[in-house]
Image: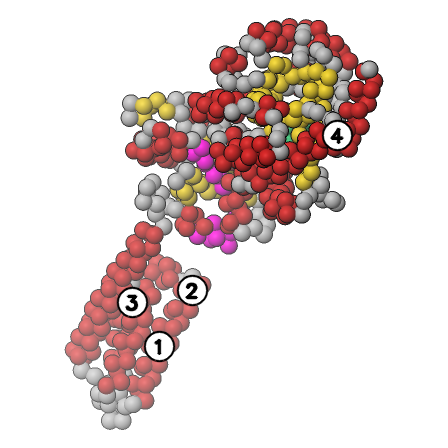
C-alpha cells in the first residue's frame, strides 16, 4: 500500500489524489444531505472511481473503489429516520464497485497502451527499426528541460548512396543493420536514432566515455568489411557536439553535430568535433549564397585579365580572364570561394555566361585597337558537360567573328579524374569544334602521369605549388622532365604563379613555353592591360 502511494505521490500525482478524494467526499456529502443511500444520488460514486481508473489503471482503481464503497456504507440508508444499511448489501456494493473500478481501469490501460503503440510506430524508422528524428527531438526537448549536459553525435554514412546506386540497396540495408548492431555492442550507454537514410544520431550521457568506441567503429568501417560476400568500405563521418548547458534549442544542437560531421573531404571517414570557426565559415558561405543573385543583377562582378607571356618568342600570347566581386564595404571574397558556392547553389551558369559574354566583348574591342591576344576562361565540370552553354558560347563567338582557336577553356586537373570517360569525350568534342583545352593547376590533383598521354588537351599549366619549389633540386628535375615529356606529346606548357627571376631563369632553361605570374604582371583591368600591352611591345622593339 505504501509502495502504491509512493508510486502516485509525485507533483502531478498529488493533484490527482486530491481530485479523487475531493470527489469522493463531495459524493458522500451529497448522499448524506439528500437523506442517505436510498436515493439514486449514491450512484455518483462511479465518478471518482472512473477518474481513478483513468488516472492510475486497474489495481489502484480497485482500491479506490473499495474504499469508496466502504465509506458509502457508513452513511445511513435513511438519515432522518436513522436507519443504517444492511451489512451484506454494504459489502456486496463495495465488491461491485471494486470490480467496476478494476474493469474500467483495465479498459483505460488497454486504450492507453494502444495509443502508445500507435505513437511509438510513428516514432520508429521502418528501415532501421530505430527511433526516428521525431523521437530524437522529443528526447532532446526533455533532456534540455532537465538541465543536463550531454554529447550528441551525428554519424553520416557518406558513401551509402553510391553503394546503393552502384551495388544494391539490399546490401545497403544489411550494411546499416550490421553497423547498428556494432554500435550497440561498442557503445552501450547511448540512445541511438536513425534521423535520415544516410545518418544515425546518438545522444550520450555526460559521464559516458564514448571516444574509444566511436573511433574504433569509424576505423573498422573505413577498411573494407565483408557483407553478403561483398567487400565494401563504409565511410563514416562522425560529428561530435558537446552540449555544456546554456540556451540552445534541440534544432541548433542537432545542427551543430551535423555541421561538425561536414568537415574533412567527402567521403573521408573520421571523427570531427564542432568548432565555432566552422560555423562562422558556414555563415560566410550562407551570406555569399544569399547575395550572389543580387550581385549579378547589380553588376557587382567584373573581370580582370592576367597576361601570359610566351618566353620563346617574347610575345604576349594571351590573357587569363579572372572574375572579381566588388563587395563594397563588405568583407572581400575571392573567386575560389564564391565560384564554389555558386556551383553548389546552381548559379554558376549565369556567372559563366556573364564572364564569357563580357570577355568576348572585351576581346572584340581590343582587336579593333590592334591588341590581339588569345584568352582563357576557367570553367567548372558542370559547365564542361553543359551542351546548351557550349552552343551559346559558340554562337556569340561566331557572331563576333572571333577565331575559336583563340579561346582556351581551362579545366582544373581535379575534374579530369572524375567520370573520366565522359569528360574525355567532352574534351575531344570541344577540341574538334576548334577550342583549345588547357589543364589548370596541374600537380594539385591525384592523377598519374599516364593521364597526360590519354586525356585530350592542348596546354598544360603547372601549378604555382611546383613553381614555388623550383629552387629545390629534386623538384627542379621533376619540372624539367615534365616539360620534356609534354613537349614530346606536342603539348604547350605554361608555368603558373611565377614571381621571381630565378624561377623564370630555370623555366626558360627547361624550354617552358609560357609564363603567367606576378613576375610579369598581376591580373589587370582592361585599361591597365592595354597599357601593359603597348609598353611590352614598345620596350621590346
Ligand atoms: P586559376 O585559374 O589557377 O587562376 C590563377 C590564380 O592565381 C588567380 O587567382 C591569380 O590571380 C593567381 N596568380 C596568378 N599569378 C600569381 C602569382 O604570381 N602569385 C600568386 N600568389 N598568385 C598568382 P584568383 O584570381 O584569385 O583565382 C583563383 C581561382 O578562382 C582561379 O584559379 C580559378 O580556378 C577560379 N576562377 C577565377 N575566375 C573564375 C571564373 O570566371 N570562372 C571559374 N569557373 N573560376 C574562376
Ligand atoms: Mg585558371
Ligand atoms: Mg591555376
Question: Can residue 74 be seen?
Answer: no
Of labels 4 and 3, the one closer to you: 4
Cα distance in 3D space between marks 2 and 3? 16 Å
Q: Secondary structure at mark 2?
A: helix
Verify CB contact (< 8 Å) between mark 1 and mark 4. no
Indicate whether residue 199 is drawn in magenta. Answer: no
Disc 2 residue: CB within 8 Å of ligand 1: no
**Which one is earlier in the sequence, the residue at label 1 or at label 3?**
1
Residue 236 position, x and y percent, is: 45, 31
Residue bearing mark 2: 12
User: Which class describes the residues within 10 Å of circle 2: few (<14), some (14-19), or many (20+)?
Assistant: few
Residue bearing mark 4: 369
Q: What segment carries the magenta color?
A: 138-158
Cα distance in 3D space between marks 4 and 3? 96 Å
Q: Secondary structure at mark 4?
A: loop
User: Which class describes the residues within 10 Å of circle 3: few (<14), some (14-19), or many (20+)?
Assistant: many
Residue bearing mark 3: 53
Identified at 30% across, 55% down, the residue is 118
Q: Secondary structure at mark 3?
A: helix
In front: 428, or 268? 428
Residue bearing mark 1: 23
Verify CB contact (< 8 Å) between mark 2 and mark 3. no
> Which quarter of the image is occupied by the C terminus?
top right
Disc 4 residue: CB within 8 Å of ligand 1: no
The quadrant where residue 334 appears: top right
Question: Can residue 362 be seen?
Answer: yes
Q: Secondary structure at mark 1?
A: helix
Verify CB contact (< 8 Å) between mark 4 and mark 3. no
Amino acid at each position: 500500500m505504501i509502495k502504491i502511494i509512493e508510486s502516485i505521490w509525485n507533483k502531478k500525482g498529488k493533484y490527482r489524489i486530491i481530485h479523487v478524494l475531493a470527489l469522493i467526499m463531495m459524493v458522500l456529502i451529497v448522499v448524506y444531505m439528500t437523506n442517505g443511500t436510498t436515493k439514486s444520488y449514491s450512484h455518483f460514486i462511479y465518478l471518482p472511481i472512473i477518474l481513478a481508473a483513468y488516472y492510475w489503471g486497474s489495481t489502484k482503481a480497485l482500491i479506490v473503489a473499495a474504499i469508496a464503497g466502504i465509506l458509502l456504507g457508513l452513511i445511513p440508508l435513511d438519515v432522518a429516520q436513522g436507519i443504517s444499511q444492511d451489512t451484506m448489501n454494504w459489502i456486496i456494493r463495495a465488491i461491485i464497485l471494486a470490480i467496476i473500478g478494476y474493469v474500467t481501469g483495465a479498459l483505460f490501460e488497454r486504450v492507453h497502451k494502444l495509443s502508445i503503440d500507435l505513437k511509438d510506430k510513428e516514432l520508429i524508422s521502418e528501415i532501421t527499426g530505430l527511433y526516428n528524428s521525431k523521437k530524437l527531438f522529443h528526447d532532446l526537448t526533455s533532456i534540455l528541460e532537465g538541465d543536463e549536459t550531454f554529447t550528441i553525435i551525428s554519424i553520416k554514412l557518406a558513401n551509402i548512396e553510391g553503394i546503393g546506386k552502384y551495388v544494391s540497396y539490399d546490401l545497403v540495408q544489411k550494411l546499416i543493420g550490421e553497423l547498428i548492431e556494432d554500435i550497440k555492442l561498442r557503445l552501450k550507454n547511448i540512445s541511438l536514432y536513425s534521423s535520415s537514410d544516410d545518418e544515425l544520431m546518438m545522444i550520450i550521457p555526460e559521464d559516458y566515455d564514448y571516444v574509444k568506441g566511436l573511433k574504433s567503429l569509424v576505423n573498422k568501417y573505413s577498411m573494407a568489411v565483408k557483407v553478403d560476400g561483398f567487400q565494401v568500405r563504409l565511410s563514416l563521418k562522425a560529428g561530435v557536439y558537446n552540449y555544456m548547458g546554456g540556451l540552445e534549442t534541440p534544432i541548433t544542437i542537432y545542427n551543430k553535430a551535423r555541421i561538425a560531421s561536414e568537415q574533412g573531404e567527402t567521403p573521408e571517414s573520421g571523427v570531427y568535433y564542432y568548432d565555432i570557426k566552422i560555423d562562422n565559415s558556414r555563415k560566410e558561405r550562407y551570406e555569399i549564397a544569399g547575395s550572389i543573385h543580387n550581385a549579378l543583377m547589380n553588376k557587382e562582378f567584373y573581370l580582370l585579365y592576367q597576361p601570359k607571356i610566351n618566353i620563346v618568342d617574347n610575345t604576349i600570347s594571351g590573357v587569363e580572364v579572372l572574375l572579381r566581386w566588388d563587395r563594397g564595404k563588405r568583407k572581400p571574397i575571392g573567386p575560389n570561394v564564391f565560384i564554389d558556392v555558386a556551383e553548389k547553389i546552381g548559379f554558376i551558369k549565369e556567372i559563366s555566361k556573364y564572364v564569357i559574354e563580357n570577355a568576348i566583348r572585351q576581346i572584340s574591342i581590343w582587336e579593333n585597337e590592334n591588341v590581339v591576344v588569345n584568352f582563357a576562361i576557367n570553367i567548372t565540370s558542370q559547365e564542361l558537360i553543359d551542351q546548351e552553354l557550349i552552343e551559346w558560347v559558340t554562337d556569340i563567338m561566331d557572331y563576333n567573328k572571333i577565331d575559336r582557336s583563340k579561346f582556351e577553356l581551362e579545366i582544373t586537373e581535379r575534374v579530369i579524374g572524375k567520370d573520366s570517360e565522359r569528360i574525355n569525350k567532352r574534351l575531344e568534342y570541344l577540341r574538334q569544334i576548334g577550342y583549345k583545352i588547357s589543364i589548370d593547376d596541374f600537380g594539385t590533383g591525384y592523377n598519374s602521369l599516364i593521364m597526360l598521354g590519354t586525356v585530350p588537351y592542348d596546354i598544360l599549366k603547372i601549378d604555382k605549388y611546383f613553381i614555388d619549389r623550383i629552387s629545390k633540386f629534386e623538384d627542379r628535375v621533376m619540372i624539367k622532365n615534365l616539360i620534356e615529356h609534354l613537349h614530346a606529346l606536342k603539348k604547350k606548357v605554361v608555368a603558373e604563379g611565377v614571381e621571381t627571376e630565378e624561377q623564370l631563369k630555370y623555366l626558360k632553361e627547361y624550354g617552358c613555353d609560357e609564363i603567367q605570374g606576378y613576375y610579369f604582371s598581376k591580373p589587370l583591368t582592361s585599361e591597365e592591360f592595354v597599357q601593359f600591352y603597348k609598353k611590352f611591345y614598345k620596350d621590346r622593339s
